[in-house]
Amino acid sequence: MSATVGHQVGCALAFEVEEPATLALQVAVARAATLILDEEIQVSVDGSPFTGTVREPTGDHGSRFHVLDAPRGAVTIAYTAAITGTPPDPVAATELELLAYLRPSRYCPSDRLVGWATGEFGHLGRGHDAVQTITDWIARRTAYVFGSSGPTDGAVDTLMAGQGVCRDFAHLGVTICRGLDIPARTVAVYAPGLSPMDFHAVFEAYTGDAWQVYDATRLAPRSALVRIATGRDAADTAFVTVIGGRAELRATEITAVVDGVLPEDRWDRPVILP
């Protein structure tokens, strides 16, 4: 069992809603049985408290949505959470999970890269060392360039361009792993130590006994990451989805800190994310 953790995380989002719209947010910390959340979400419209209902459906892997029907105006949403407790022991994946995270998905078309992935990495097997080699390769061959990719770019685009942002690095890792029959998935996280601070994306691969987290960007220590949402790719883990109407995101502010000293990361060692 891992040591007790302490984090303070949160975000502030500002929207200009031009036509009434439903906002589906994934910014809350994922539920984990042994972690205690002291959290709050506040919504205002044109500076006054929102009088509608904020619904909270729960998704896979403890991820949660906050859904509200936003009227016209300046809508601001502030979420804060203090996290304490002991991370739970890892749980073995179900057969259904493993099958789901082997399939190609919108941003991770692994069926298009099977031949290339097998030629490059197929001799490595399907354990942690194989995924670590893939992660190291992405880190060497892909430049982190802010604004270098668009919202519809997938892993093949990233491979060809040789550059991207955190979600592109995660998509490429997931796609290569799935091409080698290694189950893999993307994870949206709060990332203490990230600079500049923002939402962050990493990937997890199942290498036989647990989901282990990998990050080819190497921008924040993995042991400090806080899970928000988990899914096939960014289509499942987007921090906001606008449904109907028109709403423009005008500003974001993300915070993520740990109690005490930020841990260092040994990038070659396995890490399990609560």
Image: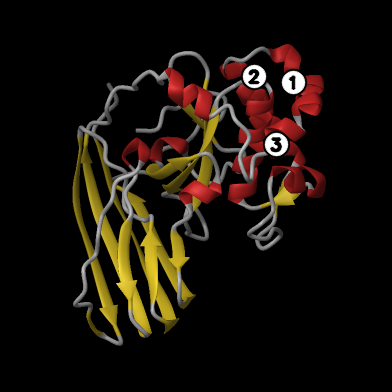
- Give the residue at mark 1: 121
Q: Which three-letter amino acid code belongs to the residue tagged 2? A: Ala
- Give the residue at mark 2: 130
Residue at screen point 51% across, 29% down: 100
Say if 240 sits above or below 104 in the image. Answer: below
Which circle, 3 or 1, is nearer the viewer? Answer: 1
Q: If the image is split into quadrants, where does the C terminus sit?
A: top left
CA gap, disc 2 and disc 1: 7 Å
Q: Which three-letter amino acid code belongs to the residue tagged 1? A: Phe
Say if 71 sits above or below 237 in the image. Answer: below
Q: Position of residue 191 (x, y in %)?
A: 44, 48
CA gap, disc 3 and disc 1: 12 Å
Q: Secondary structure at mark 3?
A: helix
Describe residue 177's horizontal placement relative to residue 73 as left or right. right
Lower position in the chain sequence, tag 3 or tag 2: 2
> Can you name the residue that lies furthest to the front here?
244
Lower position in the chain sequence, tag 3 or tag 1: 1
Tell me whether the residue at label 2 lies in contact with that at label 1, contact meaning CB atoms closer than 8 angstroms.
yes
- Give the residue at mark 3: 138
